[in-house]
Image (tube, grey):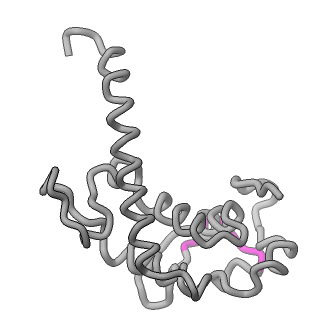
């Protein structure tokens, strides 16, 4: 079953009943009742890490029951491709190629991982760290591929 990854419809939305029947009540509590997509919600209580209700809803609609997709969607919401490309993920494996690469914001990363562990209790932290590092590597690959193309489009005077 293919899920839409963009919020459509009315101003107020809640998780579809078909998805709730598959995943139960493991998502953020605000997603089970209709509400304003622009409302800021704290991903994990007390974390101070905020995102809009619509962004979180979109992550869950895209992920469905897949916890790894949920992690990737949440990380992509908090960190743009450039931030990912300039990062070494979790900082666990030091970057020998480029020591200037810093780990992703630890507070945000740990909050996202905790949220995903609440969603899927068997989701190991080591798996999450690999996914975060993989996203950083992929962002660098994309940037490396596109830089020559972008430079060829620029006028010679730059």
Work out whether residue 80 or residue 134 is closer to the camera in this orientation and state it.
134
In percent of width and height, residue 114 lies at 47, 84
In percent of width and height, residue 125 lies at 43, 81
**Can you say whether 22 is above or below 78 in the image?**
below
Give the residue drawn at x 35%, y 38%. Answer: 143
The reply, left or right, for residue 112 in relation to residue 118 is left
**Can you say whether 40 is above or below 29 in the image?**
above
Q: Main secondary structure of the magenta part?
A: loop
Look at the image and tell me in which quarter the N terminus lies. bottom right
The reply, left or right, for residue 55 in relation to residue 21 is left
Give the residue drawn at x 72%, y 74%. Answer: 35
The reply, left or right, for residue 113 in relation to residue 70 is left
Give, as a single range, the part of the protein colored magenta: 33-40
**Rendered image quadrant of residue 140:** top left
Work out whether residue 50 or residue 65 is closer to the camera in this orientation and state it.
65
In percent of width and height, residue 135 lies at 42, 56
Give the residue drawn at x 27%, y 57%. Answer: 87
Work out whether residue 8 or residue 100 is closer to the camera in this orientation and state it.
100
């Amino acid at each position: 079953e293919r899920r839409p990854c963009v919020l459509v419809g009315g101003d107020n939305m809640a998780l579809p009943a078909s998805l709730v029947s598959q995943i139960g009540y493991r998502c953020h509590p605000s997603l089970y009742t209709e509400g304003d997509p622009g409302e800021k919600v704290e991903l994990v209580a007390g974390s101070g890490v905020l995102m809009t209700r619509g962004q979180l809803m979109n992550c869950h609609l895209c992920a469905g029951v897949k916890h790894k997709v949920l992690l990737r969607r949440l990380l992509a919401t908090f960190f743009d491709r450039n931030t990912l490309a300039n990062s070494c993920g979790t900082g666990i494996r030091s970057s020998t190629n480029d020591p200037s690469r810093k780990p992703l914001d630890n507070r945000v990363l740990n909050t996202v991982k905790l949220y995903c562990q609440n969603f899927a209790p068997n989701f190991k932290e080591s798996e999450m760290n690999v996914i975060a590092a993989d996203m950083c590597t992929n962002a660098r690959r994309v940037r490396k591929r596109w830089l020559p193309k972008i430079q060829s489009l620029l006028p010679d005077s730059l």
